[in-house]
């Protein structure tokens, strides 16, 4: 797969893999952002990326930021037909004010092939060992 990246300004840091076999490509903040406890913001990355048809970009947390700082991404699926600048929704779940620097890693994107299943409407679903049991049904 080839992705095409357009920078929104010359000093934007482009997404990259930190290590050879990483699953996620790091995304970087394109500006300084301060997040108060409980605050959420959409942080610009300074890049627009064209993903090949049949694929999507899935935005995930950087585990170090999530565990150590309490910064949590608010999810994101980037479709192949979106060619605008990418933003990363982030919330500060910590009790401290957090300063994100321009050029700092803020999230990672995983590229995944997408399938479009056919839908079949049925009146019953095959019985399973779990059945209709919902949350907590397999233990605490």
Image (tube, rainbow, N blue to C red):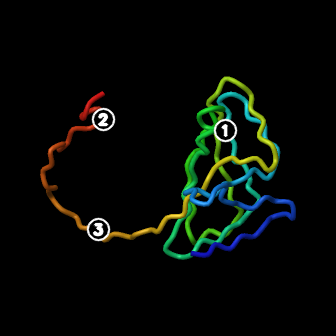
Q: 10 Å neighbourhood of mark 1: few (<14), some, or many (≥20)?
A: some
Select label 2 or label 1 by which is in front: 2
- Residue at figure coordinates x 70%, y 60% from the top left: 15
Q: 10 Å neighbourhood of mark 3: few (<14), some, or many (≥20)?
A: few
- Residue at figure coordinates x 68%, y 28% from the top left: 37
In the drawing, does residue 37 fall left or right of residue 128?
Answer: right
Above-or-below relation of 66 to 16: above
In the drawing, does residue 128 fall left or right of residue 73?
Answer: left
Indicate the position of residue 90 as horizontal and vertical percent values: 65, 42
Q: Earlier in the sequence, mark 2 or mark 1?
A: 1
Q: Which residue is mark 2?
A: 135
Q: Secondary structure at mark 1?
A: strand
Q: Earlier in the sequence, mark 1 or mark 3?
A: 1
In the drawing, does residue 139 fall left or right of residue 73?
Answer: left
Quarter location, residue 63: top right
Question: Which dot marks residue 54?
Answer: none
Cα distance between the residues tagged 2 and 3: 25 Å
In the picture, the quarter occupied by the C terminus is top left
Give the residue at the far front of this rendering: 20
Q: Which residue is mark 3?
A: 119
Quarter location, residue 118: bottom left
Question: Which dot marks residue 40?
Answer: 1
């Amino acid at each position: 797969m080839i992705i095409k990246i357009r920078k929104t300004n010359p000093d934007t840091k482009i997404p990259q893999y930190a290590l050879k076999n990483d699953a996620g490509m790091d995304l970087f903040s394109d500006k300084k952002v301060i997040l108060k406890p409980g605050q959420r913001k959409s942080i610009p990355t300074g890049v627009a990326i064209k993903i090949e048809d049949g694929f999507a970009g899935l935005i995930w947390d950087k585990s170090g930021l999530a565990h150590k700082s309490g910064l949590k991404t608010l999810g994101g699926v980037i479709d192949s037909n979106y060619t605008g600048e990418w933003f990363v929704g982030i919330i500060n779940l910590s009790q401290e004010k957090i300063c994100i620097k321009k050029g700092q890693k803020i999230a990672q994107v995983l590229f995944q092939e997408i399938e479009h299943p056919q839908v079949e409407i049925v009146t019953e679903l095959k019985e399973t060992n779990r059945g209709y049991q919902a949350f907590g049904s397999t233990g605490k």
